[in-house]
Every structure is written in C-alpha cells, then in structure tokens.
Amino acid sequence: MFYRENGQFKTNYRADQQIFPILQDRIAVLAVVVFAFAVVPFLATDYVFSAILIPVVILSLAALGTNILIGYCGQISLGSGAFMAVGAYATYNVMMRLPGTPLIVALLLGGLFAAIFGVLFGLPSLRVRGLYLAVTTLAAQFFADWMFYRVKWLSMNSPSISVTAPDVSFFGIALNSYPSKYLFCLTLLALFALASKNLVRSAIGREWMAIRDMDVAAEVIGIRPVYAKLTAFAVSSFIIGVAGALWAFFYLGAWEPDAFGLDMSLALLFMVIIGGLGSIMGNFIGAAFMVVLPILLRLSVPKFGDLFGMQLGTATAAHLELMLFGVLIVWFLIVEPHGLARLWSTAKHKLRQWPFPH
C-alpha cells in the first residue's frame, strides 16, 4: 500500500521524463547512495573492502560498459578483458612516462586509448553479426594478450612482464587506504552510471536499441548503422578501459596480462546475462552476484561437508562455483533472458498493484 503513485501528478514534460518518476524510487535511491557514501566507509572492515566492496564497484563499472555494447546495441563481445587491459596499461604508461599527470587525466586517457582500440576491432561489426562478431572480438582478446606479452615497451621493459601500480593521489589526497579507494571508485561508478542512464535515453541510445532489435529496419528508417555501432563500441570500450585501470591500480596493485585474459571477458559477459541485458541496475546486481557467491561457497561448502562427515575443501567449492554459474546462465537464458533486473522490475510492478490482482 505504500508503493503507489496516488497524488503524484506530472505537470510538465521534464517531470514525466525523470529517471525515477515515482517518489518512493527517488527516496530509495537517495537513501542507498547516502548509505554507500556516508555509512559504509565507517562500518566495513578491511576484508570487506578488499574482497567485496571494491571488486563489486569496479566490476559494476566494467559490466556497465559491456552492457552498453551487448545489452543496448546487441553487439556480442568477448573482448571486454582486452579493453580493460588496454585501459590499465595505457593509464600506467601515462603516469610513468609523464610524471605529475593528474590521476583523473590518466584515467580518461586510458579510457580514450581503450575506445580507439575498441573502435578498431568494432569495424568488422559493420559487415558481420552474431557468432561471427563474437569471434572478431575474441581476436581482440588474443591480440591484446600477444601485444602485452611481446611488446616490452608497454610494460616499461619489465623483464618479468609484471608491472606494479605507482602510488596515486587525488588533489593531494593519497589514495592508499581502503576507504579512500572505495569512495573514489564509487564516485566514478555513480557518475558513469548517471551519464550512461541519460545516454541510453537520448537519441543515440534509441539508435543503439533500434540496431539491436532489427538493424535492417533501423537502416530503412534513417539510422546510420556505421555511426550507431561504432559509437557503441567507443563508449563501451571507454568505460571498460577506465574500469580496467581502476581494477589494476586499486584492486590488483601489481598485474600481468593474464589478469585481463579470456576469463575476465567471460566473467563480464556472465555478469551482464545474470544481472540483466539492457539494464543499468542489472550491472550492479550481476557484479555483486559474481563476487559474493564464490565467497559464500568457499565459506559454506566446508561447513556443509562437516555436517555429513566429508572433507570438502576450497577445490570442491571452486568446482561447485563453475557448475552453479553454468546452470544459472542456462536457466536465465531460457527462463528469464533479462536477468535478475527483470525479476526485480516484475516484483516492483506487482507491489504497485497489491492487493489488487489488476
């Protein structure tokens, strides 16, 4: 009875086109944002920051970029890990070769190089689609792995290929503690999520969705597939590149090309599928699900085995994790292709109608 629109009148177009048209939604989102920024940093422990919060925030940003390309434009991509790697290494080279470069500038330049890389490997999307496009983006993943292993200049001629992120600061504030890293990443996530939400509601966003639904019909009504597809690759790769830099600098600390391998690309694809294709909120849900579920399995499987006198270790939990993710992906593709976000949307719709059946 509390989730109703009674008395909430729209008197102009601006009010009718709000991101959250229902007052209760605006209050709930504001409460979540305030809690995440003002309360969580004082309550969470170092383990929660390092194992859950920071990975979830950064992977949510990476899933956001992946969802723009796959969920909104319909271009299947298996090269998200490569775009993250380009963003990470580009940011690293900017900060090492141009000392004194502000962190934000380095992150944006890293995203820009990732966008250029994404557009280059997005060119085949003008002629191929579906499985063939997935193969071309997979080629981007393999090319990036080869490039970062063979071109030693990109890793500052490191003999072990592994590189270590330098100390970073933001307007003189050192980002070396977990709360500062979390707040910085969360701020970028909030800004990119808001920008992406408005972007997909704009003219270019509608063009992406028209290309996704039926590219031939979209071209007939005057939409330029070249412009729509390449802008989707550019925006998606830019966001993923920034997320890759955050992942390298604020989560890994030291990394090598394997950190952004095919496993990362598949993990981002799974986040999008489980969270919800074509949903901004689904990225947060999918990232949280992919990060928290393995931790819960590692903690619960040994205890479950003790109840029945069996020795179930972390290896068993890792196998169960892969099996469970496989089952969930097949289930979502068959039963609910729009993921957990659609289930949440359906629950909200039923709540608005309760206790009436119609």
Image (cartoon, rainbow, N blue to C red):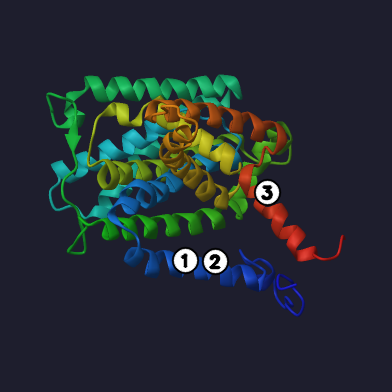
Which residue position is annotated with label 1? 33
Which residue position is annotated with label 3? 343
**Residue at image location 74% in from the left, 78% down from the top:** 9
Q: Circles 1 and 3: CB distance less than 8 Å? A: no
Which residue position is annotated with label 2? 29
- Per the image, label 1 sits on a secondary structure element best described as helix
- Which amino acid type is marked by label 2? Val
Q: Is residue 125 above or below residue 173?
A: above
**Residue at image location 55% in from the left, 55% down from the top:** 197
Q: Label 1: few (<14), some or many (≥20) within 10 Å?
A: some
Residue furthest front as drawn: 309
- Per the image, label 3 sits on a secondary structure element best described as helix
Distance from disc 1 to disc 3, alpha carbons, whole Å, reads 22 Å
Q: Position of residue 155 (x, y in %)?
A: 18, 31
Question: In screen coordinates, is 290 left or right of 338?
Answer: left
Pick whichever, 6 or 309, lies toward us: 309
Q: Is residue 276 above or below residue 123?
A: below
Distance from disc 2 to disc 1, alpha carbons, whole Å, reads 6 Å
Residue 307 visible from this viewpoint? yes
Q: Position of residue 10 (x, y in %)?
A: 72, 75
Q: Position of residue 287 (x, y in %)?
A: 48, 44
Pointer 3 or 2: first along the chain: 2
